[in-house]
Image (cartoon, rainbow, N blue to C red):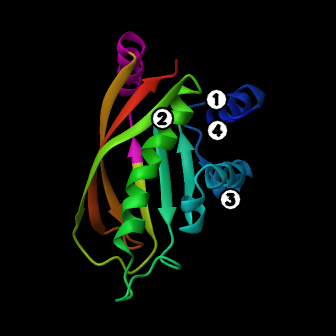
Amino acid sequence: MSSMANWGKHFLRSGRPQQPSMVWRLQHGFIFVVMNKLIGLSIPFVRRNRFRVVELRTGYLKAEIALKGNKNHIGTMYAGAMFLLAEVPGGIVALFEFGSGYFPILKELTMRYLLPATSDLTIEVSLTQAELDAIKQAADEKGKSDFTLTLDLKDEKGQVVAQSVALYQLRVKK
């Protein structure tokens, strides 16, 4: 299969737990190892920056990025690495939720840096089934659908060190 979404759909048919409450954690299976490798092959910049998905379920994704390898000249996380953490998850969620007949585009992203990031960071994307259905329905009807994700980037203590607002567009492949 040529895309992550096709691979994900195949995995869904071949044994992925179907219960929405089932949480996949990296330590509970190889799915995240394989998924993160596929993401890294598709976007080498993501792999170089030590971005990885650590949790995934319907409408939800949790990802992290390591401080190691992403420090700036003053020893805090480089702003570009934080931007990457804010940008990539929306695309991954779209690919896995909507499949290979659709593709996400980032139209705009703003970052608000609040505190120096001195540890690994995490971000969580959460969309309800109703939100997912509305995005897909609009894309099916118009060929594209805009959606916005407002996300918090948190340090290891749970402090919000930055906030992002990302405008994506889901497009139907022709």
The type of residue carrying mark 2 is: Ala
- Dot 3 corresponds to which residue? 27
Q: Position of residue 165 (x, y in %)?
A: 26, 49
Checking the image for residue 18, the label placed there is: 1
The residue at the far bottom in this view is: 74
Magenta-drawn stretch contains 129: yes
Mark 4 vs mark 1: in front: 4
Q: Main secondary structure of the magenta part?
A: helix
Checking the image for residue 4, the label placed there is: 4
The type of residue carrying mark 3 is: Gln
Work out whether residue 15 or residue 139 is closer to the camera in this orientation and state it: 139
User: How far apart, in angstroms, are the residues tagged by discs 2 and 4?
Assistant: 11 Å
Quadrant for the N terminus, please.
Answer: top right
User: How far apart, in angstroms, are the residues tagged by discs 3 and 2?
Assistant: 24 Å
Is tag 1's residue or tag 2's residue first in the polypeptide sequence? Answer: 1
- Dot 2 corresponds to which residue? 94
Callout 2: helix, strand or loop?
helix
Residue 12 visible at all: yes
Q: Which residue is drawn at 40% across and 20% down?
A: 133
Is tag 2's residue or tag 4's residue first in the polypeptide sequence? Answer: 4
Q: Which residue is drawn at 68% across and 59% down?
A: 27
Callout 1: helix, strand or loop?
loop
